[in-house]
Image (cartoon, grey):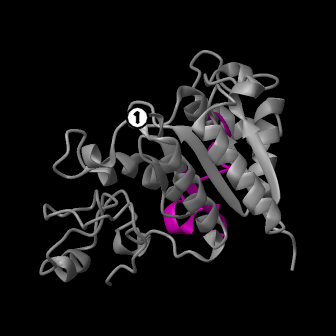
Amino acid sequence: MAQKTALIVYAHQSPASFNAAARDAAVEALTGQGYKVLVSDLYAMNFKASATAEDIKGDLKNAEHFVYNEEMLVAWQDSRLSDDITEEQQKVKQADLVIFQFPLYWFSVPAIMKGWIDRVLIQGFAFSMQRMYDNGMFQEKKAMLSFTTGATESMFQPDGIHGDINVALWPLQNGVLHFCGFQVLTPQIFWCPAFSPPPVRTAMLDAWRERLSGLMVEKPLSFAPTEFFDLSFQGGFRLRPEVKEQFASQPYGITTAQHLGKPLPPNNQMKAKQMDS
């Protein structure tokens, strides 16, 4: 069998952090399984977060009205992207598995990682209007979020002060990873390690190592397949009438966001489950 490659996109400023320990555990475990492991340490690389015209070599298509998405598509087609972006895209192309390791900032990724998403996962390379979601560019690849929180797990329950963690995860897991076609694995969440005693922190890392041993055979999360939708501007890219009718008698919505005005399906973004169809 060909050697598999894992890419860890890592964002933390301190080598003494729990995130660094989680990254190191993943590198060790995956290397031990025979993986080639690549790490993009974004702070150490001083990776540029802002998406600007500096990301393009040569002339712009329309310098009077700079539209990043359109200009980057042309630059990607002409092999005129900046070297740092090209290097990261080469890593993604090699990877069978991409792990994003980070501390949760404002219910999302740190700015430097958002910059990686904005600048690396561009139109043409990571998606197109014809190739997105389950027909996406990266449908043969797996991806997952692995992150620490400052809050306890109870604070992210449906009745917790921060609200349902499934809702918070939807933009990243569906809007970024699934949109690009990745098979999205269940997130690895390290709840509140900064306020956990050493034995608990050790147990968290041990559980992560154990999970990594079987990561690539895990079933991915379920999302609404594109065939459920009328993929035309006339149809508004909305659920087909027969699909709505099919789910009318179900107690829950289809996903966290395609909820159809019903209660959200429990743990839709936290646990892999075959969707009823």
Is residue 128 in sight in this rendering?
no
Quarter of the image for residue 14 reads: top right
**Left or right of residue 169, residue 184 in this image:** right
**Which amino acid type is shown beneath numbered disc 1?**
Gly
Quarter of the image for residue 136 reads: bottom right
Residue at image point 30% right, 57% down: 236
Residue, far top: 64
**Left or right of residue 155, residue 245 in this image:** left
Magenta-colored span: 119-145
Q: Is residue 66 above or below residue 127?
A: above
Residue at image point 63% right, 73% down: 214
Q: Is residue 45 above or below residue 140?
A: above
196 or 19, which lies in front?
196
On-image quarter of the C terminus: bottom left
Pinpoint residue 15: horizontal percent, then vertical percent.
70, 30
194 or 51, which lies in front?
194
157 or 247, which lies in front?
157
Query: For residue 142: magenta?
Result: yes
Residue at image point 48% right, 57% down: 187
Specify the principal SS of the magenta part. Answer: loop
